[in-house]
Image (cartoon, rainbow, N blue to C red):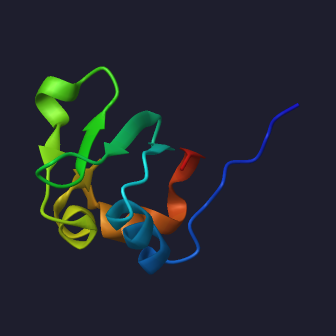
Amino acid sequence: MDVPYDKYKTIEDFIAEIDSNFDIEFEYGGKYFSICPTLKGPSIAEWGKEDETEATFENGEALVNNYVINGRLLKDIVKEINVLSH
């Protein structure tokens, strides 16, 4: 039985969870990503490709406004990502 993925209803909800130091794991376009809190701010990376894809930002808003997945800004695909855990 397939379990449906969770989805974010708004970009504000997504940013609030990032800024609340949630660990967030999600899938988009067949790629898997993690967002984790660090001392320097939230960090995001594609699973298995951390050396090439990891980026750390000042806050959640900066992360969603600047991180690109498959040629699209994260802020433009928030409602499309498949949330695995948060």
Count of picture labels: 0
Q: Determine whether 36 is above or below 78 in the image.
A: above
- From this viewpoint, which residue is outermost toward the top? 48
Horizontal and vertical percent position of residue 25 = 47, 42
Horizontal and vertical percent position of residue 2 = 81, 35
Q: Is residue 63 left or right of residue 9?
A: left
Residue at the spot 17% in from the left edge and 55% down from the top edge: 41
Horizontal and vertical percent position of residue 56 = 14, 49
**Is any atom of residue 28 visible in this view?**
no
**Is any atom of residue 56 visible in this view?**
yes
Residue at the spot 18% in from the left edge and 68% down from the top edge: 62
Viewer-nearest residue: 40 or 57: 40
Q: Is residue 45 left or right of residue 22?
A: left
Q: Is residue 63 left or right of residue 33?
A: left
Residue at the spot 56% in from the left edge and 49% down from the top edge: 83
Residue at the spot 12% in from the left edge and 63% down from the top edge: 58
Q: Quadrant of residue 48?
A: top left
- From this viewpoint, which residue is outermost toward the right? 1
